Image (tube, rainbow, N blue to C red):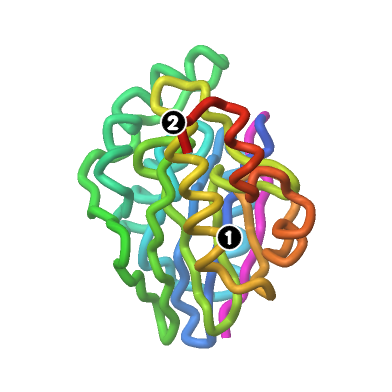
Amino acid sequence: MITVKTFYLNELRECCYILSDETKECVIVDPGISSKSEQDRIVKYISSENLKPVKLLCTHGHFDHVMGNRFITDTYGIPTYIHPADKELLKVAKSTCLLFAIAIKEPSLETEDLKDGDTVTFGHSSLQVISTPGHTWGSVLFYNPEEKICLTGDTVFAGSCGRTDLPEGDNKAMCKSLTEIIAKKISPDTILYPGHGPDTTMEEELAHNPYLRKDVWMGFNLDL
């Protein structure tokens, strides 16, 4: 059984997740660590639970989600997995952080590629990789349909969705990701763990999140 531990990190309150199972192996997802105290919180949890990190997973490459990548890879000697379309974002993460007066070590560019349909494993558990471009070119979900959990990154939030007005954003791609992929591929009783804000359920978002309806996107003149 997968245990999900949530950490709210950095000034943007980014959600970092540590997923583990009965084997004590774990994966660290989106470590947006920006301070020594946040480093200590992560290390303390891993140590107190006697966990063994085996992989660092990125839902996408924006700076607030990868601030702590180098700390994690240096501390635990584990590989980083990211969609290749977002690898360029790792290259500018350090300089982008400086705009917010945050000094970080540059994330490792020695990464393993994630693509749609991949399976990421740890211990006895696995996560399906689902490509959901829109917020960035390489945004992905990590989904376990058996245990009904899905890490959505900045693609979908409780009652909203990720912004698409940055250079790597795409309204039409986001519409497709939300209305044709998430709304149709994720089971309604799945718990969604987003990149910011509280967790929610697919059932709740289908009922109340307007961005999961294609007719809402038609107002953006996307030629749908």
- From the top left corner, tell me how far across and down residue 157 is, in percent: 67, 47
Regarding mark 1 in the picture, which secondary structure is present there?
helix
Instruction: Write down the quadrant of residue 27 in the picture.
Output: bottom left
In magenta, the rendered stretch is 1-11
Nearest the viewer among 23 and 117 is: 117
Placement of 143 over or under 206, stated as above or below: below
Image side of residue 13 versus residue 169, left or right: right
For label 2, count other residues whose C-alpha is less than 10 Å away and answer few (under 14), some (14-19) or many (20+). some
Secondary structure of the magenta portion, mostly?
strand
Amino acid on which the number 2 mark rests in the picture: Asp
Point 67% across, 29% down: residue: 11
Residue tagged by mark 2?
170
Residue tagged by mark 1?
183
- From the top left corner, tell me how far across and down residue 148 is, in percent: 60, 77
Nearest the viewer among 26 and 204 is: 204
Point 38% across, 54% down: residue: 131
Point 79% across, 52% down: residue: 208
